[in-house]
Amino acid sequence: MSRLTSEEALTLIKEAPLLELGQRASERKKELHPKGVTTFVIDRNINYTNVCWVDCDFCAFYRHAKDDDAYILTFEQIDEKIDELVAIGGTQILFQGGVHPKLKIDFYEDLVGHIHEKYPQITIHAFSAIELDYIARYSKITLKECLQRLKDKGLSSIPGAGAEILSDRVRDIIAPKKHDSHVWIDVHRQAHELGIKSTATMMFGTVETDEEIIEHWNMVRKLQDETGGFRAFIMWSFQGQNTKLMEKYPDIEKQSSNRYLRLLAVSRLFLDNVKNIQSSWVTQGPYIGQMALKYGANDLGSTMMEENVVRSAGAGYRMVEDEMVKLIQDLGETAAIRNTAYETLKTF
């Protein structure tokens, strides 16, 4: 099968009938997942702090250190959250915060080590590329040393957060303090080289062009060719409520379900070396999240026991295990709980 070019992907985004895209993406999904199993993970998002100096205009979650509602969770508070996750059979925490200006590597080593020692059954899927890059620079150590020290304490996997659109033109508009796209790629490259797997993400629907979306996919595909370290790709639409970006650019339009499904299908065709693609039911709602399974997604992501960042920007969807199983089975697919490594733990 010949690899989809950037030009071909652009034509598909702009011109292909939506149903045709769904059919092509479903065929590709079936090649990669012939048993018809759709997975999800039981986990919890834990935002250990909301203090952040990066001030992204698209984010409604962050606070500055002097704000009245700024926080850093204590170990005891984190333990309570993990205890609740363990009680419902959870296996993973997605652990990230703002980019706190005053926390060094020692804090993070103590934090990861504490969780790993107390909850060895829980996978720590933690820290965005910009968090890791800043921790290393603020601690005056190399990124490689930072990653290795956290891995030695129990860091297992890295989320793709902070990618947004891997176009520096876009990043300069929506998050001018955030590092350039090549730094995001390099953090993931170095993590992969140390045996730390990660996910790739994309937030669309701000000021990017279709060409810049494909530029993003191309950077992910090239690194995956090089390292094979991405376990999954997750895409979601910008949620603008309560954000400065909507104040600055009031003409930004809310992305339609059609647009989401169209881009999802083309991503499945373009990212031919990324086996797993998640549906973003958190931003799209459960039924478009279900429809995404007909447009290339093979995973419903997480039950999201707790989610604060997207909710701060106006998206408040929630689902429990039974609902996710029903959505999957209603399409005639087999539902399964997985772990962070996409290994099946339980089939329904």
Image: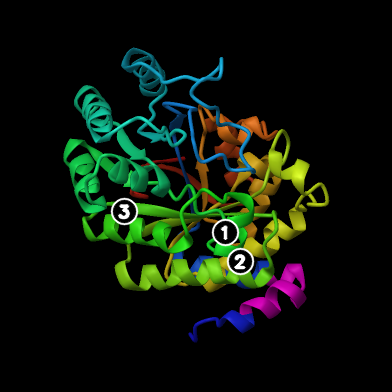
Residue plotted at (81% across, 47% down): 250
Mark drawn on residue 197 = 3
Q: Which residues are magenta?
A: 9-21
Q: Secondary structure at mark 1?
A: loop
Mark 1 lies on residue: 165
Asked whether residue 28 appears in the rendered view, the answer is: no
Front one among 172 and 296: 172
Q: Are marks 1 and 2 in contact (CB under 8 Å)?
A: yes
Measured in 3D between alpha carbons, the distance from the residue under mark 3 to the one under mark 2, in whole angstroms, is 23 Å
Instruction: Report the number of numbered marks.
Output: 3
Q: Earlier in the sequence, mark 1 or mark 2?
A: 1
Residue plotted at (44% across, 37% down): 99
Mark drawn on residue 213 = 2
Residue plotted at (36% across, 22% down): 86
Left or right of 193, for residue 177: right
Crowding at dot 3, Cα within 10 Å, few <14 / some 14-19 / many 20+, comes out as: many
x, y percent for residue 274: 43, 65
Measured in 3D between alpha carbons, the distance from the residue under mark 3 to the one under mark 1, in whole angstroms, is 20 Å
x, y percent for residue 24: 62, 73
